Image (cartoon, grey):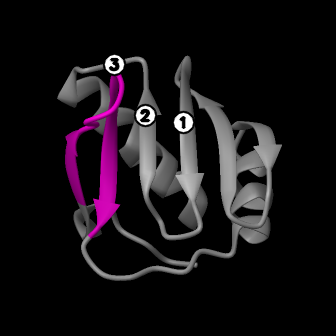
Amino acid sequence: MKIEFNDFVGQPCKSRVAYEFIPKNELKLDLEEAAANLRGNEVFVEMETPYLLMLKIGGKDVSLFKSGKIIVKNTNEKAVARKIAESLVEKISA
């Protein structure tokens, strides 16, 4: 599974204190494969469903959706959220 961070658009979440990264093109992630890659790269997978992974990475709660959308929770700081999302994308593809 090869995805690049450049394939995402970041914006503040409208409904809560969070930052979301939306894929520019439609993605259908294999979350089972993604979860296995993330566990192998020292990311804590808190919850796994066919449509959503809830993760802990870089001290933040992160949701990863089958659609590829990433939500970095509890931050409004673009730089912080971007760093975490970039790290997540690298670890999914590793």
**CA separation in Å, label 2 and label 1:** 5 Å
Instruction: Give yes or no for contact between labels 2 and 1 (Cβ–Cβ under 8 Å).
Output: yes
Which secondary structure lies at badge 3? loop
1 left or right, relative to 53: left
Residue 62 lies in quadrant = top right
Amino acid type for the residue under numbered disc 2 = Val
Name which residue lies at 35% across and 68% down: 4
**CA separation in Å, label 1 and label 3:** 11 Å
**CA separation in Å, label 2 and label 3:** 7 Å
Can the viewer see residue 94?
Answer: no
Residue carrying label 2: 72
Can the viewer see residue 47?
Answer: yes
x and y, in percent, of residue 75 in the image:
34, 19
x and y, in percent, of residue 20 in the image:
33, 44
| Tally of marks | 3
* In magenta segment, residue 15: yes
Which secondary structure lies at badge 2? strand
Which secondary structure lies at badge 1? strand
Name which residue lies at 69% across and 37% down: 43
Q: Which residues are magenta?
A: 9-23
Residue 62 marker: 1
Q: Quarter of the image containing the C terminus? A: bottom right
Magenta stretch, main secondary structure, is strand
Marked residue nearer the N-terminal end (2 or 1): 1
Amino acid type for the residue under numbered disc 1 = Val
Q: Nearer the viewer, residue 6 or 25?
A: 25
Say if 34 sits above or below 15 in the image: below
* In magenta segment, residue 82: no
x and y, in percent, of residue 29 in the image:
59, 74
Residue carrying label 3: 75
